[in-house]
Image (spheres, rainbow, N blue to C red):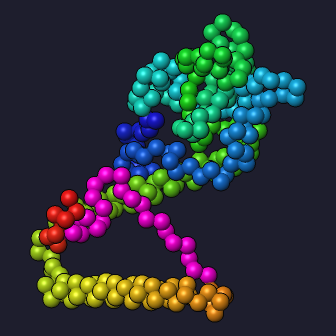
């Protein structure tokens, strides 16, 4: 979505307002669903009336481009103007987490032939092609008339603040990573060797403990299995069944070849 700035009144660092650099991260990825009082399925089900199988559009307002043609061809075109427009919510896509909305005309949702649109525009032949007045929008750009607009406003502000903070941190790390390293004090070889020593010592200790535990486990399992009456209070873990490979050599054959006497297995 394009952002319009007054070239004669651009913000500065001292203003501490909008970022000096363009916003390039989409707002929808910072949306907090905890603000929602209903699930997407519950919102869509509001279009169902008792005793009827036809689902009607759910009234709301969506942030949409005023130019329908350019809005579909190039949604990020700087010439586009976006406004909050009355819509009817037709459907929801679980994969994309987008809502299908239809701009109202005189408060009604009608197709090109003036007929009411029911069941999300889905018929026995499938979903009809998208009309110029229809858009798939994220939840952060859709206000249902049945929700508290103050909570929705907090939702948008929270997402925008998180987006600004994230972009600022990305820029900060970019600045640090782009700084020259010439002339800086590098870590000494002695320090590197010391860290490698302690790292390898820690790994060796873990391997040794794991080996000793495995050997104790084998001995303990053998003793418990040989005297089940004496160790009736001990439960041995289930043994994992060894899988025989469908292709390739078995372990014994491979081991024999490695030791130079594999000819006897052929």
Q: Is residue 64 left or right of residue 114?
A: left
- Please, what is the dominant secondary structure of the magenta stretch? loop
Q: Position of residue 126 (x, y in %)?
A: 60, 19
Quadrant of the image containing the C terminus: bottom left
Q: Residue furthest left?
A: 183
Which picture quadrant has residue 98? Answer: top right
In this view, the residue in front, 147 or 34, is 34
The answer to which of 242 and 202 lies nearer the viewer is 242
The front one of 242 and 86 is 242
Reply yes or no: does residue 228 show up in magenta: no
Instruction: Report the magenta residues as a range.
Output: 235-258
Image coordinates of residue 240 in percent, x first then y, are 49, 68
Q: Is residue 115 left or right of residue 213?
A: right
In the figure, 248 relative to 262: above or below? above
Q: Which residue is most to the right?
A: 51
Q: Is residue 84 visible?
A: no
Q: Is residue 51 visible?
A: yes
What percent of the width, then of the height, locates residue 187?
A: 17, 81
User: Residue farthest to the bottom?
Assistant: 230
Q: Report the residue at 69% width, 14% height from top.
A: 110
In the rendered view, does 191 fall on the left or right side of 239? left
Farthest front residue in view: 264
Residue 112 is situated, as x and y percent measured from the top left of the image, at 63, 9
Q: Quadrant of residue 16?
A: bottom left
């Amino acid at each position: 979505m394009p952002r319009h700035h007054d070239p004669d009144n651009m913000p500065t660092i001292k203003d501490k307002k909008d970022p000096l650099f363009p916003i390039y991260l989409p707002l929808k990825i910072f949306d907090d669903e905890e603000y929602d009082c209903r699930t997407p399925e519950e919102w869509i089900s509001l279009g169902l009336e008792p005793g009827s199988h036809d689902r009607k559009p759910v009234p709301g307002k969506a942030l949409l481009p005023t130019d329908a043609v350019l809005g579909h061809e190039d949604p990020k075109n700087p010439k586009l103007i976006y406004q909050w427009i009355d819509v009817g919510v037709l459907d929801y896509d679980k994969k994309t987490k987008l809502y299908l909305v239809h701009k109202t005309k005189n408060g009604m949702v009608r197709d090109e032939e003036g007929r009411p649109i029911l069941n999300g525009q889905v018929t026995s032949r499938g979903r009809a092609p998208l009309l110029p007045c229809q858009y798939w929008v994220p939840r952060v750009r859709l206000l249902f008339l049945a929700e508290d607009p103050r909570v929705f406003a907090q939702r948008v502000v929270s997402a925008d603040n998180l987006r600004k903070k994230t972009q600022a941190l990305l820029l900060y790390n970019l600045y640090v990573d782009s700084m020259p390293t010439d002339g800086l004090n590098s870590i000494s070889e002695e320090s590197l060797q010391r860290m490698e020593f302690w790292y390898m010592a820690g790994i060796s200790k873990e391997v040794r403990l794991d080996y000793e535990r495995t050997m104790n486990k084998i001995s303990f399992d053998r003793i418990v299995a040989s005297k089940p009456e004496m160790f009736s209070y001990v439960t041995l873990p289930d043994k994992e069944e060894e899988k025989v490979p469908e292709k390739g050599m078995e372990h014994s054959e491979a081991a024999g070849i490695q030791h130079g006497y594999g000819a006897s297995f052929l």
